[in-house]
Image (tube, grey):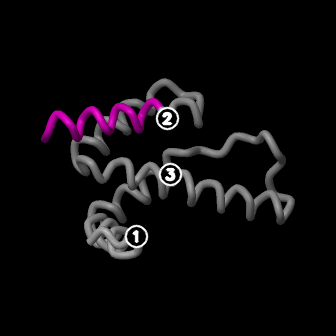
């Protein structure tokens, strides 16, 4: 466990609290930072992206209204597991795309 990983997880947890409005989500962000290190930011980014896509699809189908609550922890957990296994590959792909790797 690295200190920078824990701090990046806390920052991700703060972002998550604002999105979900629940105070207990900081612990999940800290765990992401502890296990994923700097890749926790990647997990949070993709968690927000997947959550936005799912909520957009639910609103388009009429199953969810604008302003309805959607649990963010599910998406963050899912993308955290994906990032755990393929986070470095995703990051390397991104660096190749921008010409930095």
Image quadrant in which you'd find residue 26: top left
Q: Which residue lies at the image location 33% right of the left edge and 75% below the top edge?
A: 96
Q: Are marks 1 and 2 in contact (CB under 8 Å)?
A: no
Which residue is nearer to you in this view: 97 or 66? 97
Q: Secondary structure at mark 3?
A: helix
Q: Which residue lies at the image location 70% right of the left edge and 56% below the top edge?
A: 55
Image quadrant in which you'd find residue 10: top left
Identify the residue under disc 3.
74
Q: Is 25 above or below relative to 1?
A: above
Q: Which mark sits nearer the N-terminus, 2 or 3?
A: 2
Q: Is residue 81 left or right of residue 4?
A: right
Q: Which residue lies at the image location 79% right of the left edge and 39% below the top edge?
A: 67
Q: Which mark sits nearer the N-terminus, 3 or 1?
A: 3
Which portion, as a residue range, is magenta?
1-14
Q: Is 11 above or below relative to 75?
A: above
Q: Position of residue 42 (x, y in %)?
A: 39, 55
Dividing the image into 4 quarters, which one contains the C terminus? bottom left
Q: Main secondary structure of the magenta part?
A: helix
Q: Is 21 above or below relative to 64?
A: above
Identify the residue under disc 2.
15
Q: How far apart are the alpha carbons under marks 1 and 2? A: 26 Å
Q: How far apart are the alpha carbons under marks 2 and 3? A: 15 Å
Image quadrant in which you'd find residue 22: top right
Q: Is residue 79 left or right of residue 21?
A: left
Q: Secondary structure at mark 1?
A: helix
Q: Position of residue 79 (x, y in %)?
A: 42, 59
Q: Which numbered circle lies on residue 98? A: 1
Q: Which residue lies at the image location 59% right of the left edge and 44% below the top edge?
A: 71
Q: Nearer the viewer, mark 1 or mark 2?
A: 1
- Residue that extends furthest to the front in the rendered view of this protein: 99
Q: Secondary structure at mark 2?
A: helix
Q: Which mark sits nearer the N-terminus, 1 or 2?
A: 2
């Amino acid at each position: 466990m690295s200190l920078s990983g824990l701090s990046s997880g806390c920052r991700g947890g703060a972002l998550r609290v604002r999105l979900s409005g629940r105070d207990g989500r900081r612990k999940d962000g800290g765990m992401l930072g502890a296990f994923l290190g700097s890749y926790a930011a990647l997990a949070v980014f993709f968690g927000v992206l997947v959550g936005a896509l799912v909520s957009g699809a639910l609103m388009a189908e009429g199953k969810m209204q604008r302003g309805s609550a959607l649990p963010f922890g599910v998406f963050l957990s899912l993308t955290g597991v994906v990032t755990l296994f393929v986070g470095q590959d995703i990051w390397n792909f991104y660096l190749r795309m921008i010409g930095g790797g």
